[in-house]
Image (cartoon, rainbow, N blue to C red):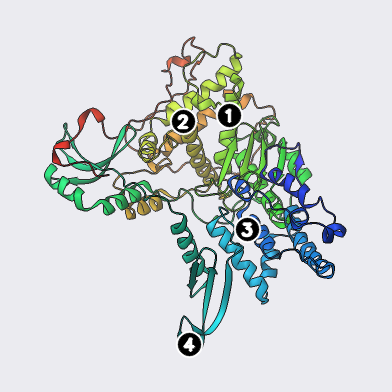
Amino acid sequence: MIEDFGHRISGAAKDRWQDYRHRIRAVDDQMIWTSSLSDAFPEPAYKTLQSEGVDSWSLAFIRAIRDTVPRKPTKAASAVSWARTVIQLRSLCTQLLDGVTSREDLERTLSKSEESNKIISTRIAMYQAIGHDRSLKSFEIQAGLWKRFNNVEYNPRKFFCRIRDKKSGISVYGETTREAIRNLSTAISKKRAGPARKAMRFDVYSNKATGEVFIGRKMGSDIIKIEAFTTANEAAEYLKDNQEYLEERFEALSHNPEERRSVNTAREGIDRRAGRDITAKEFHTTFGFRGVQFGNYVEGKRRQKDLNNAYDALMDLAEVLDCDPSDLSLKGTLGLAFGARGRGGKGAAAAHYEPGHVVINLTKNNGAGSLAHEWFHGLDNHLGRRTGAAGLFGTELKQQSLSHLTYEDREEIGAFATLIRNLKKTGIGKRSAQLDRFRSSPYYTQPCEIGARCFEAWVISELDRRDIRNDYLANISSEEMYTTEARLLGHDDNRFPYPLKSEMKLVSDAFEVLFDPEGVMMRNLPGHLDARWETPVKPRQLHVSEGDAKVDTGTVDLAGTGTASGTERSTGEMSEPDHDLDDLEIDFSVGDPVF
């Protein structure tokens, strides 16, 4: 199995297991029969590990396995048998922690017909669905074909799954195990539910400039229009009786289609590896990443697959940038991780870049398709770090004095400022602002995110010119698919977070200025080789809008000493929301606000 290689990258999710792995090995197998259960098979801090992104199935497996261990008997003869059970179950857990046994292997074992295995599988699913706020050990699971269930006779017998706990009084069932667990989750939620959720507040607004009347919800400094009306009285009457619908409508408006397609298609294009597997040594020699890291739950075969896919993707990216593959590690400062650093939970990112550790992490299940996006963040931060602040990105530096930097550093950072100024000439800033209206803090309008999304789109278009398709490198939903799904959600505005087809000419021109072989970015790369790639490149086939804006080719001097090529300075600001609050007034005369 391929192990981590290069320098060790701190902060990985698997490092959070280290303490537990030491604790679970503290008692030798030979001493288990004389030890307590808490010493022989200690419990991890389930909630803490869950919040830190440890693989949810693995955590549920360990807890479900431990739940099956009975209390240690007092008689010595029985304690020996108990110790054998603990040794066997503990061994399964340590093999999982060490990556010796995969989730797939364990699921195969549990799928066998033994009743105890089925109960463990059900308990794993229970913890995955309900979490680790409480132990589910006391819940009894009964599943099978029943001739009589709840005083009803069945011929032929019918499957039911019943889960009940005498202590809490909870008893649920379902015609499938999944249905029973869903009902259990609902029952537990009701038991521990606090006060009823406060209803969303909606008010009636009128736009003084246009005369428009609508029911809306205030979000920060913006107002989200929910429903339009002819008169304020009509809106007020509607508001009294339709709170539930207005909340559902707001939730629909705030939900956005997926930005990436759910499935990555197989790569198409020149065979980079001649059909062979890439070794860790070759990968390290080719790209020179500071370190490459794998999560404990990324199994041996999957590690090889990820390494092969990443090799192809990075070689494709190097060709698009016309640089040596070793340049992609940013002078050996960038790290790469596969399923080693993600944090689980609702809304968890498919991939992320960590400025603090200078590492890209691609999650095990959803990371493919995000490599180009995260690599751009790495390059962006590589420039920002030159200011002396690890968390800064070059795209977000404004007209502040950087006179302490070298001329070359200021020149490269200025090139990124020019890029953002050029991208602002498209409509992506306005569409991003529409997406951020429903968020508590800006995300889509951040210059670093706009730059990364536009970079993805440009990479895809450049690969297409070379008859290459690589969804592992960049996979985004098409403009048509995203818009269609948005319409189904009731959106009447365009929120596509990537460049439109009609904007791609300007976007492509902007990135070609940034990555010009003779430009400031590329000539400072240590391994840059002219004519490194020989794949034929087709002419661009772009949708050109009449009156398209032209890109600026000068760079912004961020040291405050003037602007190169006579171009204006970049402010890094994005488009304003549709509604001007100065033109809006809340109409309190038509009824009290609804709480």
Identified at 46% across, 62% down, the residue is: 187
What kind of element bears circle 2?
helix
Amino acid type assigned to the residue bearing label 3 in the image: Ala
* Mark 3 lies on residue: 60
Direction from residue 180 to residue 93 in the image, left or right: right
Amino acid type assigned to the residue bearing label 4 in the image: Tyr
Q: Nearer the viewer, residue 448 or 12?
A: 12
Marks 3/1: CA–CA distance: 37 Å
Residues packed near mark 4 inside 10 Å, few (<14), some (14 to 19) or many (20 plus): few
* Mark 2 lies on residue: 447
- Percent x, y for residue 403? 56, 11
Q: Earlier in the sequence, mark 2 or mark 3?
A: 3
- Percent x, y for residue 478? 43, 50
Direction from residue 310 to residue 348 in the image, left or right: left
Marks 3/4: CA–CA distance: 34 Å
Residues packed near mark 3 inside 10 Å, few (<14), some (14 to 19) or many (20 plus): many
Residue 518 in view (yes/no): no
| CB-based contact (under 8 Å), mark 1 and mark 2 | no
What kind of element bears circle 4?
strand
Marks 1/2: CA–CA distance: 12 Å
Marks 4/2: CA–CA distance: 63 Å
**Within the image, what quadrant is residue 322 found in?**
top right
Q: Residue furthest bottom?
A: 155
Quadrant of the image containing the C terminus: top left
* Mark 4 lies on residue: 154
